[in-house]
Image (cartoon, helix red, strand yellow):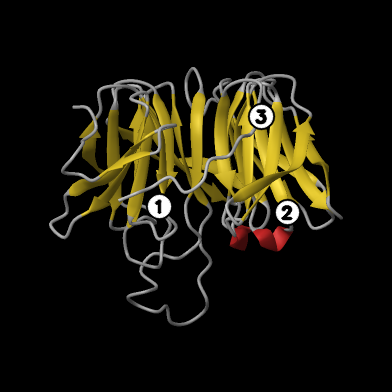
Amino acid sequence: MVSVVNTVDTSHEDMIHDAQMDYYGTRLATCSSDRSVKIFDIKNGSQILAADLRGHEGPVWQVAWAHPMFGNVLASCSYDRKVIIWKEEGGTWDRLYEYDGHDSSVNSVSWASHEFGLLLACGSSDGSISVLSCLGDGTWEPHKISNAHTIGCNAVSWAPAVIPGTLMDAPSGPKSTPVKRFVSGGCDNLIKIWREEDGQWAEEKKMEAHSDWVRDVAWAPSIGLPSGTIASCSQDGRVFIWTCDDPAGGSWTPKLLHKFGDVVWHVSWSITGNILAVSGGDNKVSLWKESTDGQWKCVSDVNKGQGISSGPDETRPEQ
C-alpha cells in the first residue's frame, strides 16, 4: 500500500514536467514549462524554497541530481536546446556549465554512476545523444553520438557500475573495471544500448518490441547479480521488462509487464531495483513487483493529485 505523505506547493506558473529527490531525500528539484527550475528543502513534512533557477528560454523537461560526492550538482534540459549544469557553492546556486551543442529540444538527462566520474548523457529530438564529461581541471568535454535515433531520442539511462555476477562469484586476479554503458529510447520505436570503446561510443544492441515511440527507459540498479534488467515504456501503452543473463554482451529478452489503456510516460526503479513505478496518461502511478514465479504483479496504484491509494485487489490499471 502507498499513501501520499506530503504535497509540495511549487508555485510554478505552468505545467510541471519532472520532480526529483536528491540522494538523501532532503531536497526536491522541479522543472516546468514556465522555464524555471526550483529547489526545495524538505524537512519535517514541510518545504522551503531554496532556489529558483532561471537560465532556460523554453519549457524545462527534466532534472537530474549528481551523486553527492561531487557536491550539490543538478542538471536540467530544455526545449531551448540547452543543458545547464548547476552547482551550489556557499548556499548560492550558479551555472557550472552550459551545453548548447544540440539542434533541437533536449528531452532527457541522466548521470552515470559516481564510479565513472561526473558524466552526463543527454538525449535530443535532433536524433543525437551527447555525453558530457568533467575533466580533472574542471573543464567539460562533450562527445556526440550522431543519428542515434531517427526522428529523435526521448530517454537515456545509465547501466550500474557494479560488475555482473560479483555478488555470487567474487572476481579473482586483477580488479576488473566496469564498462561504461547506457540505454536509450527513441521515436524510431527502438531501444539501443551504447558502450564506450577506446574513448568512443558504439551501438552494442538494438532492441525491438514497441510499436510506437519509446517514451522512457530505465536500467535497474544492481547489487552484483549475474543478470541485468531494463524497463521500457511507450506511446503504444505497453511496458516491457528486458532481462539479460550476460549484460556484458549477451542477448536481451523482453517480457510484457502490462498493456495500459493510454500512453505510458515514465518508468522508474526503486533504489534496490525490485519495484518499478509506472506513470502515464491514465493519471495513475502504479507500483509493480516480480513474484517468485517470475510474474510481475501490481502491488499498489495511486491516482495522481488525489492522494488515493489502493491495493492490487481493489483497483487495477486500465486494460
Q: Earlier in the sequence, mark 1 or mark 3?
A: 3
Q: Is residue 206 above or below residue 137?
A: above
Q: Would you say residue 61 is visible in this rendering?
A: yes
Mark 1 crowd level (few <14, some 14–19, many ≥20, 10 Å Cα): many
| Mark 2: amino acid | Asn
Closest to the camera, between mark 1 and mark 2, is 2
User: In this figure, which residue is indicated by the disc labeled 3?
Assistant: 11
- The reply to whether dot 2 and dot 3 touch (C-beta < 8 Å) is no
**Element under disc 1:** loop
Which is more toward the observer, 122 or 233? 233
Percent x, y for residue 180? 53, 53
Q: For the residues labelled 1 and 2, say whether their Cβ atoms are less than 8 Å apart.
A: no
Q: Is residue 251 visible?
A: no
The image's mark for residue 203 is none
Q: Rate crowding at label 3 as few (under 14), some (14 to 19) or many (20 or more) other CA atoms within 10 Å.
A: few
Q: Residue at x 35, y 69 (%)?
A: 165
Q: Provide residue 79's location: percent of width, then percent of height.
A: 64, 20
Picture layout, residue 209 above or below residue 170 = above
Q: Residue at x 43, y 34 (%)?
A: 216
Quickly name the residue at label 2: 72
Q: In the image, residue 13 lies at what x, y percent?
A: 66, 21
Residue 301: quarter of image? top left
Going by the numbered disc 1, the residue's amino acid type is: Ala
Q: Amino acid at mark 3?
A: Ser
- Tag 2 or tag 1, which sits nearer the N-term? 2
- The span from disc 2 to disc 3 (Cα, nearest Å) is 23 Å
The numbered mark, 2 or 3, whose residue comes first in the sequence reads 3
Which class describes the residues within 10 Å of circle 2: few (<14), some (14-19), or many (20+)? some
When the figure is inspected, residue 128 is found, relative to residue 66, above or below; the finding is above
Q: CA distance from mark 1 to mark 3?
A: 33 Å
Q: Label 2's element?
A: loop
